[in-house]
Image (spheres, helix red, strand yellow):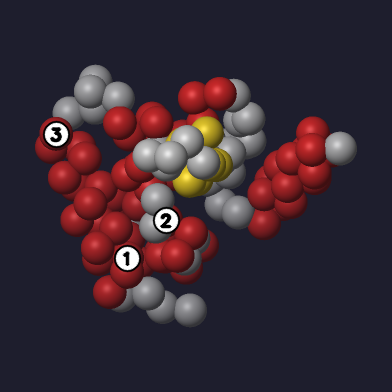
Amino acid sequence: MLRREVEAMDQWGKHHKRWWVGVDIGDRHILLSETGDPKVIDLFGLGTPMLNGLIDDPVVFSRHISPDECRYLFDMPDLQDPSHPAEYLLRLKQALSTARTRTVR
């Protein structure tokens, strides 16, 4: 049943969200709180196109993905990877801040 719901969510994303990569329900995408309870379930593949879209034009990005939908962006396992250069992460944070303050709907 869960798989069916996840597949339906993936189909929705493919038709409604720019930069959609897909859904991943692997173990590394389930984040737990200090007590071991699920804190965030990161199902959505970020992908380089989405992150570069944020950096290239934060205002356009915010038209497609709301700031609320990005609230856990830097908790995602892919961005916790130490292989990401610090400068890249700083540019992402600055772009996300711009997207939040200049959201145009």
**Local SS, label 3:** helix
Q: Residue furthest top?
A: 83
Q: In this view, does 73 lie to the left or right of 20?
A: left
* Residue situated in front as seen by the camera: 105 or 30: 30
Say the numbered circle drawn on residue 99: 1
Question: Which residue in the structure is indicated by mark 3?
Answer: 86
Question: Which residue in the structure is indicated by mark 2?
Answer: 70
Say which residue appears at 63% left-offset and 35% top-offset: 23
Asked whether disc 1 touches disc 2, contact meaning CB atoms under 8 Å apart, the reply is yes
- Nearer-N-terminus badge (1/3): 3
Q: Is residue 89 left or right of residue 12?
A: left
The alpha-carbon separation of the residues under discs 1 and 2 comes to 10 Å
Q: Residue furthest front?
A: 35
Which three-letter amino acid code belongs to the residue tagged 1?
Ala
Could you say where residue 95 lies in the image, as x and y percent from the top left? 25, 56
Residue 101 at least partly seen = yes
Which three-letter amino acid code belongs to the residue tagged 2?
Cys
Total marks in image: 3
* Residue situated in front as seen by the camera: 12 or 74: 74
Say which residue appears at 29% left-offset and 58% top-offset: 96
Kindly indicate the quadrant of the structure image that contains residue 34. top left
Which of label 1 and label 3 is nearer to you? Answer: 3
* Residue situated in front as seen by the camera: 71 or 62: 71
Could you say where residue 73 lies in the image, as x and y percent from the top left? 38, 47
Which three-letter amino acid code belongs to the residue tagged 3?
Ala
Say which residue appears at 86% left-offset and 37% top-offset: 1
Q: Residue furthest bottom?
A: 105
The alpha-carbon separation of the residues under discs 2 and 3 comes to 19 Å
Q: How crowded is mark 2: few (under 14 residues within 10 Å), some or many (20 or more)?
A: few
Q: In this view, does 44 lie to the left or right of 68?
A: right
